Amino acid sequence: MVNWSIVDSEVKEWLREAGKNIIASFETALQIDTKADANDLVTNIDKEIEQLFTNHIRRRFPSHKILGEEGFGDEIKSMDGVIWIIDPIDGTMNFIHQQRNFFISIGIFENGEGKLGYLYDVVHNELYFAKRGEGAYWDDIKLPMLEKVDVSEAVIGLSAALLTSNDSKNTLIPLVKDVRGTRSYGSAALEFAYVATGRLDAYISKMLSPWDFAGGKIIVEEVGGVVTDLKGKSLNLLEKSPVIVAKPGLHAKLIEEYFQDN
Ligand code: 2AM
Ligand code: CA
Ligand code: CA
Ligand code: CA
């Protein structure tokens, strides 16, 4: 049996340690490399922070497995056992260009079931977290369950890049016209935290990896939000996927009216 309270207090300590290291890195020269394309960036700090977590987890919880964006974890083929899904810096472009609007994201699962979720806003030293069945928190403030909202009053997060496709069936264009407003923050973790707190009513991404949504999914679901792919199917925690996260009624409406035919 896993003692989740002990895991929780360890993660919180490691997050503060990682946050301090990241803040200290603002005074140093970053080593910036590219990954899949010229705008897909990674720094030495992304790698150092992932290693900070993998070292702590392996020392303290040696039977747990790790899936991390930068590859210092394990090769994970199934969700059996306890699995930590980690994004050491979500919003690396923001980290490099803005020194803000980036988060550390951690989701901890047992046999595929989300147990603990953490989204840490390093620069503001604000932690969003949830323990399954016990609610979600923004630091020590318990987050209320999400309320329903109409499309016409919704503020949704999405990337402008989603609108550049020449596909005549781009259903995002009518959606952008119908909603009250759109916002683009460039960090999936930030946008999940904003949906969990009601600052955004929904967030849509064309493609996310498990480490982009794992922590956020646990937190948003704890306040009644819904997280699926664009067809309304539940997400596979080991695969990339388009993602929509939204307040309960709004989620069904968006799938039905804007994404059904995609
Ligand atoms: P990252 O910063 O950890 O890479 C940016 O719009 C959001 O999408 C961020 O959460 C970013 O996570 C994520 N993302 C997923 N795949 C990406 C890619 N290939 N290039 C840049 N950002 C990506
Ligand atoms: Ca990345
Ligand atoms: Ca990410
Ligand atoms: Ca990342």
Image (cartoon, rainbow, N blue to C red):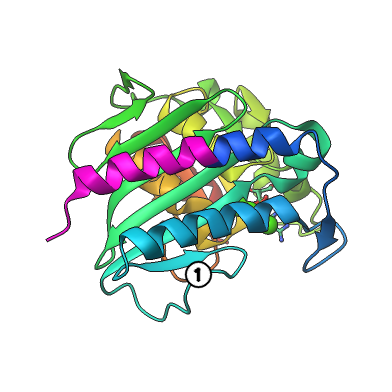
Q: Which residue is mark 1?
A: 73
Looking at the image, residue 235 sits to the left or right of residue 180; the answer is left
The kind of residue tagged 1 is Gly
Ligand 2 falls in quadrant: bottom right
Label 1, secondary structure: give it.
Answer: loop
Q: Is mark 1 within 8 Å of ligand 4?
A: no
Q: Say if 67 sits above or below 219 in the image.
A: below
Q: Which residues are magenta?
A: 1-17
Magenta segment, prevailing SS (helix, strand or loop): helix
Crowding near the residue tagged with mark 1, few <14, some 14–19, many ≥20 C-alpha atoms within 10 Å:
many
Q: Nearer the viewer, residue 152 or 2?
A: 2
Q: Is residue 16 above or below residue 258?
A: above
Tell me where residue 144 appears, x and y as whole percent: 29, 21
Q: Is residue 97 magenta?
A: no
Where the C terminus falls, by quadrant? bottom right
* Closer to the camera in the image, 101 or 16: 16
**Is 101 on the left or on the right of 36, as rendered?**
left
Is 178 displayed left or right of 223 in the figure? right
Let me know if residue 212 appears in the view: yes
**Residue shown at 51%/29% (left/top)?**
194
Can I make out residue 231 in this image? Answer: no
Q: Could you tell me residue 238's position as x and y percent?
A: 45, 71
Residue 117 screen position, x and y as percent: 36, 45
Q: Is residue 11 magenta?
A: yes
Residue appearing at x 52%, y 20% in the figure: 153
| Image position, residue 49 (x, y; %) | 59, 51
Name which residue lies at 79% across and 32% down: 98
Asked which quadrant contains residue 145, the reply is top left
